[in-house]
Amino acid sequence: MTRRLLAAVALALAAASAPSAQTQEVRAGGEVVRTFEVRDGQVYLDGRHLADAVPPGLDLDGFSMMPLELTGPIVPVLEVDGAVYVLEGEKLVPMDASSRPGRGVYILGDVTPEAVAEMPEESMTPIIEEAYMRDVAARNEALYDRMQQAESMESEVGALAARVRARPRGPERDRLREQLRGLISDLLSLKHEIRDEEIAVVAERLDAAREELEDRRGHHDDIVNGRLRELVGGQ
């Protein structure tokens, strides 16, 4: 049985390895972070067990997935044996019966590493890149604009290089070649600026992850007791 985690096309990229949360978390800048998880066939949203989330006829018995961190307009979607379900109103409903019929989905990751390994890299790369760009657009508009500028400059470089190659040797070819050199230099500088900012974003998220880990360590017993109550029904 192939069970695959999906997210709707208009969504930002989410981290499939994000830790589970007991409540919604508000991070710096007012960003609300939620979690979606399937554990032992049961659905959890922000750590809450959604007892009525699984519709009759959908067998998730024994099925678990890593917690999915949700930021922005992210909608969890599950594909089970080719059938797609959307989480709406805290219930999983068939895609064609949801508010999103006919809309595409991005595959963010399969439940098992083996299933991910079977997907051709050429199929995964554009999905990952597009999802990443949507994430950047949602989080940092200025960085997104610079990345779009770099993409436009890449096209200019290709077009100008074709003009240089088409010219016979001579002053005009030399002039275009120098123009191409300058454009390549500007593009490289822009890419360095983009990379610097991407590294800064990763460093910020890493610091936040470390703080979250330390906070969870400080609430070790509370988390254990909460998990115990979930498992034994509060008894």
Image: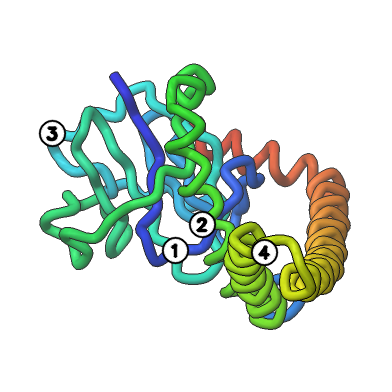
Q: Position of residue 145 (x, y in %)?
A: 64, 79
Return the mark for residue 11.
1
Check disc 3 and report the residue beneath it. 57
Work out whether mark 4 precedes mark 1 in sequence or the reverse, and give the earlier one: 1
Which residue corresponds to the image point at 52% horizontal and 42% vertical from the top-left?
A: 125
Secondary structure beneath label 2: helix
Point out the frontmost of discs 4 and 2: 4
Which residue corresponds to the image point at 37% horizontal and 34% vertical from the top-left?
A: 4
What is the crowding at mark 4: few (fewer than 14 residues within 10 Å), some, or many (at least 20)?
many
Q: Nearer the viewer, residue 45 or 137?
A: 137
Q: Are the residues at dot 1 and dot 2 in contact (C-beta closer than 8 Å)?
A: yes
- Vertically, is 58 above or below 74? above
Check disc 2 and report the residue beneath it. 131
Give the spatial CA distance, label 4 vs label 1: 41 Å
Point out the frontmost of discs 1 and 2: 2
- Vertically, is 28 above or below 169? below
Q: Amino acid at mark 1?
A: Leu
Work out whether mark 3 precedes mark 2 in sequence or the reverse, and give the earlier one: 3
Check disc 4 and report the residue beneath it. 164
Q: Nearer the viewer, residue 209 or 175?
A: 175
